[in-house]
């Protein structure tokens, strides 16, 4: 056991914080809440990311030959943690894309995609869910059929991607005659290929936020006789389920999810320390104190779970129930947190902007989508099924 | 940062587990509960011979000088077996003597603890059950020349009938509130004979109300500085709370395993009950909680061991473990259905004992108050 970061790691964290203090300007923060529908520019963020790239801080644990820095996972964790905490989400396409392309991609695919992903020039949408459902992922209906050396794709995806996406990381059925999860494959589909159409989908929340888990938009995409060469397939034909489950397992853990499920608690505590509502000082209210401590403890447990999976990845220990466990605990904490915040702030919670709104209305906006964190990337129900089967060896229902 | 066990820690856990699987079956717990002593002297001797009692005690006393995280691993396994031994009360007092005692106190007491000859206990709580405030301590010890004369009543004292020494928290200066004047005093049970009355409890452990009437001990029996003993108490309570947290967590994990086994075999509506989602998900949540209990308790133990600030981490651990362990053992019962209400099923030993441990050393809200102060109040 070793429950703290090393002095070297802490020194590195200081370096990152110094950089953030200088470069994460209000302009950069403002861009985080930009208008995703039109794919607005974010020049300040881009300039800052260029500086980070010079230091090798973006995806630093990725191999050198593909634009990474061959660095240590803990160091990468520290960079991601500090930037996320400052409200800047730099790790576009976090988990799935990089990891599976490095692991399953051809040499050409690695060269074509990984440096671009790291630089943020390539943006992958995740094309898993379809109008007919997301939880039963292996039951998806989009098809790819061979035509000579090519594949012809037909179908539709729901929620994944944004107007900025350059490619869809698309899971499709390539063989309808085998058990459902054996007949799937992944394609990296260029969004500008003929036959691809993307339509934005407005969410119940009206704006993206620096600390938002989601923006105001998701997207639907439609594929009509889209012709792709074999080289657009990632991994082998029929290997799609393996890629998807590995990618999802990675997206379910780690710093990004951890911070996105704990911001609310942290921000509420920050706010409480310095604010009151008229003559009412919430932090002096015994109910508030008990509730806040309860949330704090839950988020500490989540931090330790995140440290556990980081340790396991670093030590190459297979992750069994730990990933779905985090994917239940974090999102459930997130929901308990926002609902506790609602009970603390009373009518102030519902505000999404304006001078009366605590933290500029962040809590109101967050309230609208907090519940959903438990559904994306594998619902809490599906995750509990996985824990029960893999972690406890219980029979299938 | 590495929150998993290293090779040594893994080995320690495995050897403690396999030893206790053989040496501490549920039948031994039942026997101990029915006995006057309330514990198994055989098992106590065995764990002393294995060196467990000296794991975290200094080498000068015959111990191994390892830290609280190692001791925590053993406590977790003892909890897993709900082993009927006076481990927790003995370690609580012994670690305090090791930390704050004089050389004479250490050399008198600790070697006897390491060898298993001496059981210890401690007495802090009175009618006011709060653990984290000196105001709950009312008991007086008047200075009379070279002696202290103790008068008052302590509650929830563990194993007092078998203990050789009690670490008693009292006030050595007049006054009823605040930390000033608090002292921690070693009282040999045989020599002074405080009067103990059993407190019947759900764990069927030996708990007593202990009355001190003009109990006289030399002032040299003060552990730490006379009148300035509150930091000693805090250290004692922090270690004890962290240890009981991991001990409960160990018990809860075993209860979960019982429930999982049962859910695989018991059928209803023509299939194993574990195939019903509501059962499976209940057990999945229980696993998440117990993993969380382990992580948060080991963090507290590790920080205490390293001498890092740990009071908040201890409170986090105790608040979380107290609530989650009670829910976990209750879930294990519910999955078993009616049979869990019968004395016949071994699971009841885990349910009763872990639930009782959860009540000790500070309520969740008391610990949360300490956490709230740390996170909400500006210095
Ligand atoms: C903002 C946003 C962003 C998204 N981003 C992406 C993305 O980038 N890529 C992508 O592919 N998808 C994305 N999604 C889709 C998301 O992953 C799905 O909504 C999610 O997987 C659930 O699928 P569903 O909506 O079809 O619900 P369903 O699968 O129909 O599930 C409905 C309910 O039934 C429950 N349920 C289903 N099966 C079981 C079972 N066996 N046992 C118990 N309960 C069950 C579910 O848990 C859920 O509560 C996004 C969605 C939103 C809203």
Image (cartoon, helix red, strand yellow):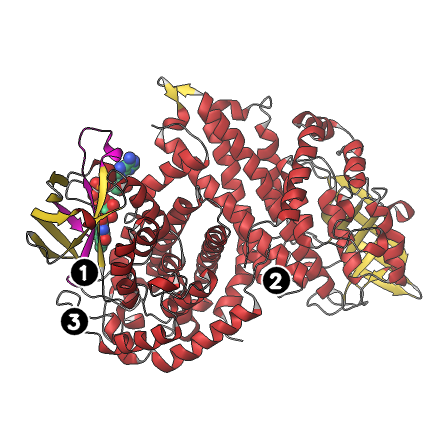
Parent chain of label 2? B
Which is in the foreground here, disc 1 or disc 2? 1
Residue on which disc 2 sits: B310
Circles 1 and 2: CB distance less than 8 Å? no
Q: Is residue A218 visible?
A: yes
Numbered mark located on residue A165 in the image = 1
Q: Residues within 10 Å of mark 3 (few under 14, many from 20)?
A: few
What kind of element bears circle 3? loop
Parent chain of label 3? A
Which residue is at 49% across, 55% downward? A304
Which is in the foreground here, disc 2 or disc 3? 3
For the residues marked 3 and 1, what is the alpha-carbon distance in whole angstroms? 13 Å
The quadrant in which the C terminus of chain B is found is: bottom right
Confirm if mark 1 falls within 8 A of ligand 1.
Answer: no
Q: Which region of the structure is painted magenta?
A: A155-183
Quarter of the image where one finds residue A155: top left
Residue on which disc 3 sits: A40
Q: Residues within 10 Å of mark 1 (few under 14, many from 20)?
A: many
What kind of element bears circle 2? loop
For the residues marked 1 and 2, what is the alpha-carbon distance in whole angstroms? 47 Å
Q: Residues within 10 Å of mark 2 (few under 14, many from 20)?
A: many
Ranked by sequence position, the earlier of labels 3 and 1 is 3
């Amino acid at each position: 056991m070793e429950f703290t970061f090393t002095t070297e790691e802490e020194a590195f964290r200081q370096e990152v914080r110094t950089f953030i203090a200088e470069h994460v300007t209000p302009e950069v923060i403002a861009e985080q809440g930009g208008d995703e529908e039109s794919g607005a520019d974010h020049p300040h963020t881009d300039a800052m990311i260029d500086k980070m790239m010079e230091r090798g801080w973006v995806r630093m644990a990725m191999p050198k030959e593909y634009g990474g820095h061959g660095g240590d996972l803990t160091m990468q964790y520290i960079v991601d943690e500090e930037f996320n905490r400052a409200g800047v989400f730099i790790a576009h396409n976090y988990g799935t894309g990089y990891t599976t392309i490095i692991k399953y991609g051809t040499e050409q695919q690695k060269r074509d995609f990984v440096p671009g992903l790291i630089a943020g020039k390539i943006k992958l949408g995740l094309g898993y869910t379809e109008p007919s459902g997301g939880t039963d992922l292996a039951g998806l209906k989009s098809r790819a059929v061979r035509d000579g050396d090519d594949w012809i794709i037909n179908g539709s995806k729901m929620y994944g991607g944004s107007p900025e996406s350059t490619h869809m990381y698309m899971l499709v059925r390539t063989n309808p005659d085998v058990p459902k999860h054996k007949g799937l494959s992944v394609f990296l589909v260029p969004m500008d290929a003929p036959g691809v159409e993307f339509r934005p989908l407005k969410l119940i929340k009206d704006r993206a936020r620096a600390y938002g888990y989601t923006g105001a938009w998701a997207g639907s995409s439609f594929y009509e006789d889209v012709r792709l060469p074999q080289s657009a397939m990632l991994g082998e034909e029929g290997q799609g389920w393996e890629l998807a489950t590995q990618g999802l397992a990675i997206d379910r853990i780690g710093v990004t999810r951890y911070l996105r499920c704990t911001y609310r608690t942290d921000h509420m505590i920050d706010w409480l320390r310095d604010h009151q509502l008229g003559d009412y000082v919430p932090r002096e209210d015994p109910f508030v104190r008990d509730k806040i401590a309860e949330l704090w403890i839950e988020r500490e447990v989540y931090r330790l779970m995140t440290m556990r999976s980081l340790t396991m990845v670093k030590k190459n220990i297979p992750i069994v129930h730990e990933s779905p466990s985090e994917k239940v605990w974090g999102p459930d904490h997130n929901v308990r947190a926002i609902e506790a915040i609602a009970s603390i702030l009373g009518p102030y919670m519902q505000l999404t902007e304006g001078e009366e709104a605590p933290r500029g209305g962040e809590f109101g906006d967050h309230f609208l989508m907090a519940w959903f964190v438990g559904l994306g990337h594998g619902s809490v129900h599906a995750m509990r099924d996985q824990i029960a089967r893999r972690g406890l060896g219980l029979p299938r229902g | 940062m590495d929150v998993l066990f290293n090779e040594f820690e893994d080995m320690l856990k495995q050897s403690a587990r396999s030893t206790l699987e053989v040496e501490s079956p549920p039948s031994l717990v039942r026997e101990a509960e029915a006995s006057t002593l309330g514990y198994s002297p055989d098992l106590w001797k065995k764990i002393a011979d294995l060196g467990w009692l000296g794991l975290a005690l200094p080498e000068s006393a015959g111990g191994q000088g390892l830290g609280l995280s190692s001791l925590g691993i053993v406590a977790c396994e003892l909890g897993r077996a709900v082993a009927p031994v006076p481990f927790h009360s003995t370690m609580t007092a012994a670690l305090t003597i090791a930390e704050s005692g004089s050389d004479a106190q250490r050399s008198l007491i600790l070697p006897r603890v390491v060898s298993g000859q001496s059981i210890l206990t401690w007495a802090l709580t009175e009618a006011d059950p709060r653990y984290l405030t000196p105001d709950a301590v009312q008991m007086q010890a008047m200075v009379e020349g070279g002696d202290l004369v103790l008068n008052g009543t302590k509650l929830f004292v563990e194993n007092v009938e078998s203990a050789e020494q009690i670490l008693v928290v009292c006030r050595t200066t007049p006054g009823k509130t605040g930390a000033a004047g608090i002292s921690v005093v070693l009282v040999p049970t045989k020599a002074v004979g405080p009067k103990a009355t059993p407190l019947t409890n759900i764990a069927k452990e030996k708990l007593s109300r202990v009355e001190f009437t003009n109990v006289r001990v030399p002032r040299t029996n003060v552990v730490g500085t006379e009148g300035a003993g509150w930091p000693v108490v805090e250290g004692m309570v922090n270690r004890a709370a962290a240890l009981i947290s991991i001990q409960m967590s160990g018990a809860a994990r075993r209860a979960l395993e019982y429930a999982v086994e049962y859910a695989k075999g018991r059928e209803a509506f023509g299939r194993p009950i574990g195939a019903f989602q509501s059962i499976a998900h209940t057990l999945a949540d229980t696993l998440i909680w117990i993993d969380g209990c382990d992580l948060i308790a080991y963090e507290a133990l590790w920080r205490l061991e390293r001498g890092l600030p740990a009071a908040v981490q201890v409170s986090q651990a105790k608040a979380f473990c107290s609530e989650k362990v009670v829910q976990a053992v209750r879930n294990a019962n519910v999955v078993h259905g009616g049979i869990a209400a019968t004395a016949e099923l071994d699971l009841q030993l885990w349910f009763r004992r872990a639930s009782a441990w959860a009540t000790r050393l500070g309520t969740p809200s008391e610990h949360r108050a300490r956490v709230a102060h740390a996170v909400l109040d500006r210095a």
